[in-house]
Image (tube, rainbow, N blue to C red):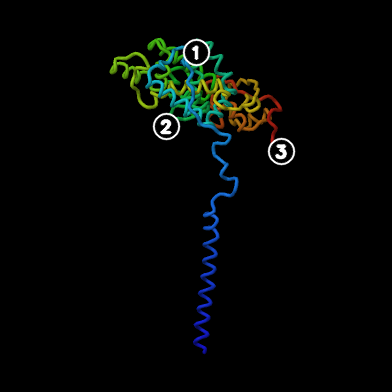
Amino acid sequence: MKHIKNILAVIGLVVVIGSLIFAAQSTPLEKHAKGPSIGDSDKNVSNGYQISAIEIPDDLNFAGESVPLEDPEILERVDREFLVNTYWQSNALLMMKRAHKYFPVIEPILAKNGIPDDFKYLAVAESGLQNAVSPAGARGFWQIMKGTAKEYGLEVNSNVDERYHVEKATQVACEYLKKWKKRFGSWTLTAAAYNAGPSGIRKYMDIQKADNYYDLLLGEETGRYVFRIMAIKEIISNPDKYGFDVEKEDFYNAVPTFSVEVDTSVASWADFAKLYEINYKILKRHNPWLREPHLNNSTGKKYVVEIPNKGYYRQSSR
């Protein structure tokens, strides 16, 4: 009898466990088997968001030099850059916001030097209007190499790196561009030379016996470079046309500043900043060319430091 009870107990336990397993498995399976609930079939990922081909402007040009869109290979390359830069929405939106802040600084320097306004978009392509550092060591908005910076009179040392000074770096970029425009005779080739180096472009021209950017077979980056600049120019200039809903208050704005001349050494920029009721971080934000927390200045050189207008930044009580 005892043996029979044990058998029944085991059977009962098996039944209970089996029921639990079946319940656990059947519930989610049944839900999946039923599919979406009523009304879900009407939902579509495209609702409120459309992806479409982009119409390329017929008058597309760089610095007034027309693009031969009748060439199907050129058209494809242009189309690629328009698609990539339009549908990389976060990046495009950031470029628009930064452009509103920095283009007013760059534009008058280009104009003063006779450089076409389109070259401000070259700075966007080079650095995204950030003080970027390339693997090769180029720095700042205009991605200037150390040797080029010194050749054109910028100070570059452990204390100071004027490649991070937007106005001074823009002036150097203008001088560089003017020099190579005289050599190449074309703003488009000059822009390509800015990316690949003048000797690199000259090598391609000599080997291929061509003197037009659109006729040259170039490396991947330089081959896309001018097309990318034109796409960035078109999108930033016409945000509504490319689906960007940007309000005036969405843009970044420059903080108003005043200038302070410094012609001595500075033992501590942090202490210097406190004199103007700001901190070291804010001082560096407005003067990124200052590379160390102090300034040696043994020669008594005059530097101009930008200080935000009083009261613009509210100081922490700590």
Residue 287: where, in percent of width, then height? 58, 26
Between the C-alphas of marks 2 and 3, the distance is: 40 Å
Between 131 and 154, which is closer to the camera in this rendering? 131
In the rendered image, is residue 300 in sight?
no
Labels in figure, total? 3
Is residue 261 left or right of 173 when viewed as pictured? Answer: right
Mark 2 residue crowding within 10 angstroms, few (<14) / some (14–19) / many (20+): few
Q: Position of residue 243 (x, y in %)?
A: 56, 27
Circles 1, 2 touching at the beta carbon (< 8 Å): no
Q: Is residue 80 visible?
A: yes
- Distance from disc 1 to disc 3, alpha carbons, whole Å, reads 48 Å
Q: Nearer the viewer, residue 79 or 105?
A: 79
Q: In this view, does 20 lie above or below 128?
A: below
Q: Toward the viewer: 158 or 193?
A: 193
* Number of other residues with Cα within 10 Å of mark 1, as a class: few under 14, some 14 to 19, many 20 or more: some
The alpha-carbon separation of the residues under discs 1 and 2 comes to: 29 Å
Which of marks 3 and 1 precedes in the sequence?
1
| Left/right of residue 129 with respect to residue 227 in the rendered view | right
Q: What element carries label 1?
A: loop
Residue 270 vs 105, above or below: the answer is: below
Kind of residue sitting beneath label 2: Pro
Q: Provide residue 15's location: percent of width, then percent of height.
A: 52, 74
Q: Toward which corner of the image does residue 310 lie, by quadrant?
A: top right
Q: Is mark 3 on a helix, strand or loop?
A: loop
Frontmost of labels 2 and 3 is 2
Residue carrying label 2: 135
For image coordinates 59% across by 23% down, the residue present is 100
Judge from the rendering whether residue 82 lies leftward or rightward of residue 202; answer left or right.
right
Q: Residue 116 carries which label?
A: 1
**Mark number for residue 317?**
3
Q: What residue type is labelled 1?
A: Pro
